[in-house]
Amino acid sequence: MANHGDIKAIDLSDREWKEKLTPEEYRVLRKEGTEPAGTSPLNTEKRSGVYACAGCGLELFKSDMKYDSGTGWPSFFNVIEGHVETKTDWKLVWPRTEYHCARCGGHQGHVFEDGPAPTSLRYCNNGVALNFKPSETMGGMDADTL
């Protein structure tokens, strides 16, 4: 896995990941699974803060990047620059762009070109692959100042 600037890659063994993650987190983050639509409590999260990788804690999205896509998964129109990597996923009949955490390689979801302005992108994320950190728990910092 490549390093991006100040992001130092985390490389754990499969056994270490199984010990660190819940079975559902492991299935999604390490085996590129997908959680059922509409099951994540993050779908209705509206507070200011950041969304971080559940595998390693790298911050991936600011709350002002989130929007309701109506798909049943937490969706974002942008990412924190350099914090995700993409690859082509050929698991279905047509290719899709899959994205992963730049630090631990944890599978997050897929990005589509049907999102809102200004990017027209929809990062469709598995909620189980994220942890939400409200800004009030971050020393009073607003997510926009991160």
Image: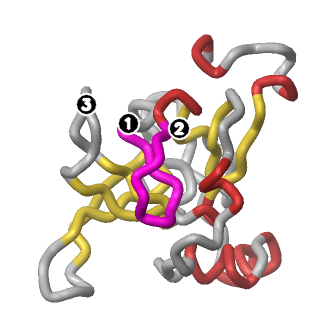
16 vs 60: above or below: below
> Which circle's residue, 3 or 1, is located before the other in the chain?
1
Q: Is residue 141 above or below residue 97?
A: above
Task: Indicate which disc residue 117 carries.
Answer: 3
The N terminus is located in which quarter?
A: bottom left
Nearer the N terminus, badge 2 or badge 3?
Answer: 2
Residue name at image x 78 percent, y 77 percent? 22
Q: Give the left or right position of residue 8, taking residue 75 as reference.
A: right
In this view, the residue in front, 111 or 26, is 111
Looking at marks 1 and 2 on the same chain, the residue that comes earlier in the sequence is marked by 2
Q: Secondary structure at mark 2?
A: strand
Question: Mark 1–mark 2 contact, CB under 8 Å?
Answer: yes
Name the disc covering residue 78, or none.
1
Rendering coords of residue 49 (x, y %): 69, 30
In percent of width and height, residue 40 lies at 65, 65
Q: Of tags 2 and 3, which is closer to the observer? A: 3
- Label 3 amino acid? Ala
Q: Which residue is mark 2?
A: 61
The quadrant the C terminus occupies is top right
Residue 73 magenta-highlighted: yes
Q: Residues within 10 Å of mark 2 (few under 14, many from 20)?
A: many
Q: Which residues are magenta?
A: 66-77
Residue 13's image quarter? bottom right
Q: Is residue 138 above or below residue 86?
A: above
Is 46 one of the magenta-colored residues?
no
